[in-house]
Image: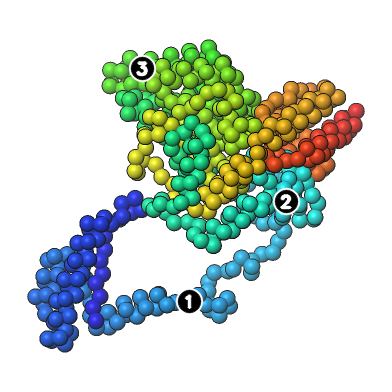
């Protein structure tokens, strides 16, 4: 009996090449023939000359006989035909989840979950359509939808079926191989936008990270050593170190600086201010004299904007501002990037928010509603920007996995076949009109109503005597889930399949919450 142990240095992106494998295969076959003939002649006595030849050909090949080889064969056979023991039949040091502390969910969150969120005292256990049910059996009308994520609501039959069926086939392999779902979803995204190619990841922050890296590489290819990306004040682009730097809100930077600086290469400009944007581009394109002498070159790599600022207070961009941004990018060889993580995938009433502004970006990002609640993100690019990355320049282990893409395809199919965008437009107009009516009845509390489609916000006046978060809490008591967008805006982001009756119900509950608030303060 004979065992050959072969080792090679490799990683996920540089697997054993076909040539290496072929050479190794020939070596094994050659050794097998020699060993077999020696076995016949000398009954398993391997001559030292044969061993010397083998080691000379490949020092990485090691030979073992007798009990060692028996152990290897026995081990491989055991692994090949092994079965998982039944629960409770073996001793293990692991404690199964079913045997752990059965304290309340809230208590376990308090003791075991990192406190990165301020949570309301509700535990949800199920949902259907636009309704969520808590652990006491109380129903809530959900106008948060996982913060603009559950586009098809909860327990949508088409989405549930797609995910279940995919799990029965294959849920994850690796981006070292082709998978049908990723190709099909990329095709749908590009066929329904200005994009030529798509890169998949797992979240909005990751899709924006990809866009930031792409912009830097593109600028580097143009000879810019000090690339600068312009974003807007009060923007929000994610929580990773680069995307939170891109976020033009200093409160998110506190405690994460190095020497007082965040990630270098970002500048901020007032949203919708054309003159300020033009002036900033001109300034950035002037390389400081000392840097120029050192062979460095500064320039605008990209202008990165949300078509509608979500966390910044539900503020839509203007056609004039985005037209100016497009021209500035064209004139300076920079990329126009649109962050569509919240407003994209139909929430504005068009598939992409930038369509509301009559502009085509070079790069745009998506996540949230893309998977209907299943984590998936994507960065789309067109033209020159679609060919910036090559193998190894960027990657994602889970990005575009079969399970997530099955969810994305189910959402895409549902949006396409059920005319969901029309529902968004009609229900959005209904919601906006209803909020404006309530504002007129409570002018001391509510201010401007703004937004697109089913991404709407109503401002809370400075002297209203309450914050947006407090008013969200009041609405919760009435069985309505809302979410704040900053300290002074209440945000309405229901599932895109919300009905006329559900919009009317939400408006009534919201008004009841305001009525109670005003009554308490009077």
Q: Secondary structure at mark 2?
A: strand
Q: Which residue is mark 2?
A: 128
CB contact under 8 Å: marks 1 and 2: no
Q: Of circles 1 and 2, which is in front?
A: 2
Instruction: Determine the residue positioned at 49% across, 27% down.
Output: 361
334 and 224: which one is in front?
334
Q: Which mark is residue 356?
A: none
The number of numbered badges drawn on the structure is 3
Q: Secondary structure at mark 3?
A: loop
Q: Which residue is mark 1?
A: 83
Say if 376 sits above or below 106 in the image: above
In the rendered structure, the answer to whether residue 275 lies left or right of residue 433 reads: left
Percent position (x, y) of residue 402? Answer: 49, 53
Percent position (x, y) of residue 337? Answer: 48, 28
The alpha-carbon separation of the residues under discs 1 and 2 comes to: 39 Å
Name which of mark 1 and mark 2 comes first in the sequence.
1
Instruction: Determine the residue positioned at 61% across, 36% down.
Output: 346
Of all residues, the one furthest to the front in this rendering is 417
250 and 150: which one is in front?
150
Say if 280 sits above or below 133 in the image: above
The alpha-carbon separation of the residues under discs 1 and 3 comes to: 66 Å
Name which of mark 1 and mark 3 comes first in the sequence.
1
Q: Which residue is mark 3?
A: 287
Say if 316 sits above or below 162 in the image: above
Q: Is residue 393 something that shows in the picture? A: yes
Query: Badge 3, how many Cα within 10 Å: few under 14, some, many 20+?
Result: some
């Amino acid at each position: 009996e004979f065992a050959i142990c072969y080792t090679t240095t490799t990683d996920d992106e540089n697997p054993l090449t076909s040539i290496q494998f072929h050479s190794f295969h020939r070596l094994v076959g050659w050794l097998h023939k020699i060993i077999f003939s020696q076995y016949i002649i000398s009954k398993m006595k391997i001559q030292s000359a044969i061993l010397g030849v083998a080691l000379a050909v490949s020092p990485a090949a090691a030979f073992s006989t007798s009990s060692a080889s028996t152990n290897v064969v026995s081990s491989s056979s055991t692994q090949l035909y092994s079965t998982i023991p039944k629960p409770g039949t073996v001793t293990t040091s692991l404690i199964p989840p079913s045997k752990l502390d059965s304290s309340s969910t809230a208590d376990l969150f308090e003791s075991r979950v990192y406190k990165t969120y301020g949570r309301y005292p509700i535990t949800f256990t199920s949902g259907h359509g636009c309704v969520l049910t808590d652990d006491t059996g109380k129903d809530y009308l959900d106008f948060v939808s996982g913060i603009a994520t559950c586009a098809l609501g909860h327990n949508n039959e088409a989405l549930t079926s797609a995910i279940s069926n995919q799990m029965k086939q294959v849920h994850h392999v690796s981006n070292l191989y082709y998978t049908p779902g990723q190709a099909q979803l990329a095709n749908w995204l590009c066929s329904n936008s200005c994009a030529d190619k798509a890169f998949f990841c797992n979240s909005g922050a990751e899709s924006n990270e990809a866009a930031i890296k792409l912009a830097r590489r593109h600028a580097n290819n143009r000879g810019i050593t000090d690339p600068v990306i312009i974003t807007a004040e009060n923007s929000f682009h994610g929580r990773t170190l680069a995307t939170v730097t891109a976020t033009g809100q200093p409160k998110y930077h506190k405690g994460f600086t190095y020497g007082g600086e965040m990630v270098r290469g970002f500048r901020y400009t007032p949203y919708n201010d054309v003159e300020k944007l033009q002036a900033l581009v001109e300034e950035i394109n002037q390389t400081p004299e000392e840097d120029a002498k050192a062979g460095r070159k500064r320039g605008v790599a990209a202008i990165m904007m949300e078509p509608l600022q979500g966390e910044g207070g539900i503020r839509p961009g203007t056609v004039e501002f985005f037209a100016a941004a497009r021209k500035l990018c064209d004139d300076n060889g920079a990329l126009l990037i649109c962050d569509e993580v919240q407003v994209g995938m139909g929430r504005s009433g068009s598939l992409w928010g930038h369509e509301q502004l009559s502009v085509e970006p070079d790069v745009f990002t998506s996540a949230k509603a893309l998977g209907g609640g299943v984590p998936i993100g994507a960065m789309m690019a067109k033209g020159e920007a679609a060919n910036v990355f090559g193998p190894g320049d960027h990657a994602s282990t889970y990005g575009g996995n079969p399970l997530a893409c099955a969810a994305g395809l189910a959402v895409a199919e549902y949006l396409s076949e059920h005319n969901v965008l029309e529902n968004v437009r009609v229900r959005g107009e209904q919601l906006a009109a209803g909020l404006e009516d309530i504002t007129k009845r409570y002018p001391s509390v509510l201010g401007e109503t703004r937004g697109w489609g089913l991404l709407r916000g109503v401002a809370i006046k400075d002297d209203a005597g309450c914050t947006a978060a407090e008013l969200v809490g009041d609405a919760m008591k009435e069985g309505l889930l809302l979410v704040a967008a900053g300290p002074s805006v209440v945000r309405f982001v229901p599932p895109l399949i919300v009905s006329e009756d559900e919009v009317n119900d939400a408006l009534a509950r919201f008004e009841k919450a305001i009525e109670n608030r005003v009554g308490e303060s009077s």
